[in-house]
Image (spheres, rainbow, N blue to C red):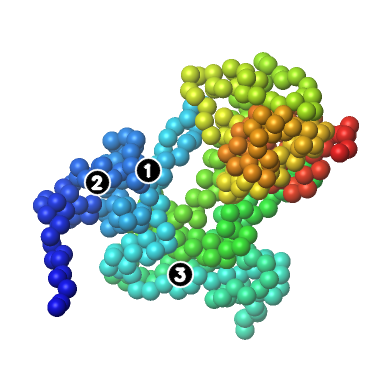
Amino acid sequence: MSEQVTPLTDNRAEMTIETADQVLEITGEQRFWTKAQRAAMATIGLKDAPMAEQVAFFHICKSTGLDPFRREIYYIPRKRKVFGQDEIYYTAQTGIDGFRHIGQRSGRFIRRIGPFWTGPETDPAWWIQGEDGINRRRWVEVWLAPGLPAAAMCRIEHYSIAGDPTVSQAVALFSEFAVTKDEWVRGERTGQKVLSGLWPTMGVHMIGKVAEAQAWRVAFPREFVNIYEHAEMEQADAAQTNQVREDSAQRRKAARAQAQPGTVIPGTVVTASTRTAPEESTGQGTPVTGAEAGEPTAGPEDEPPTADELRRELHAYASVMGSTVDKITHRWREATGTSLDEVTGGQLAVLLAELRPYVLAALGSHPEAAEHVEAGGLLIRLDPDTTVWGREDARQG
């Protein structure tokens, strides 16, 4: 006896799509976002975008053929200062595959050549003397040299508007696009910059994408006007994140200036009541959240802190305060009946947030580290050695 098979259409009546308004695909006849598409705006980060920006983004999606609901193109809001005031502006961004799609659908694309990479200007290995006696830069198709390239180059063969075959070329300098952060050694800024994000490990790939994106833009300026590859905008994102952290630190400095905490006595527990009202708000009626609320947050180049990192940060805090973890958490452990081995990441975050004002007051010999902590950073991410933050009068044990 064969098993009865339930037809696939039995339960699909309620899923039937009857009108174009029920789908997310942008059709050729469409003139604006449908009701379903507007409802899905929240999934792509545009729930609160002004109507004018929604109109502009629809035009970009329609003209490029990229589908925002398939994450082929994004419309990223950013802040900038205009006459001292914050202004929100939007940037259309896509990956390198989006650039290739737009270029190929133009009907004038022939082929892509590259990217290629080259080394430092002063290294003779990256120069070749031609038969005419002129030195020419050497470009390689695959980067196998030690270290990172100095630049990448890409060419796009295409037909001009007049129909003539032509080649467009772009060169991207590594130093102009690589994202960096301050280098810290033993709790102090060295004044040097180090690579961050994907640039230390995938710098060859990243600068290659930038060069290709710029070559596409040179070849098809109308198609790519105001559209950027993600790697091209990473410096802007890093700069904006740093500005937000600095602004938050300045607000907290002003708040603490009105109510400086007293001396921490080892063995006591700091409670939420020690936090003063000025530190709980921006002074403009807007609740403080995230990093401004004193929660440990990561910088633009870091992942969110793990529970193990928060435990190590607690050791760094104890070192700063001239005490030990056992002493500064003794009453808390007695009150909660929880050992430090069992404490959750959330509990550690709250405890660190309550200790932070006192740590900042004790970081007198490390002013730059204090600024980092004020901005929501972790001491252990500046220097993994938790003992370097100890005050000169730190007690042993």
Q: Mark 1 and mark 3: span between their CA atoms? A: 34 Å
User: Which label was assigned to residue 155?
Assistant: 3
Quarter of the image holding residue 1?
A: bottom left
Q: Which of the image's four quarters has the C terminus?
A: top right
Residue type highlighted by circle 1 = Gly
Percent across and percent down for residue 358 are 73, 27
Q: Crowdedness of circle 1 by 10 Å Cα count: few (<14), some, many (20+)? A: few
Q: Crowdedness of circle 3 by 10 Å Cα count: few (<14), some, many (20+)? A: many
> Does residue 176 appear anywhere in the picture?
no
Say which of 115 and 156 sits in front. Answer: 115
User: Which label was assigned to residue 220?
Assistant: none
Q: Mark 2 and mark 3: span between their CA atoms? A: 37 Å
What residue is shown with label 1? 45
**Secondary structure category for the residue under label 1:** loop
Percent across and percent down for residue 247 are 59, 30
Percent across and percent down for residue 55 are 27, 41
Residue type highlighted by circle 3 = Arg
Position of 85 with respect to 131 (left or right) is left
Please tell me which of labels 1 and 2 falls first in the chain. Answer: 2
Residue type highlighted by circle 2 = Gln
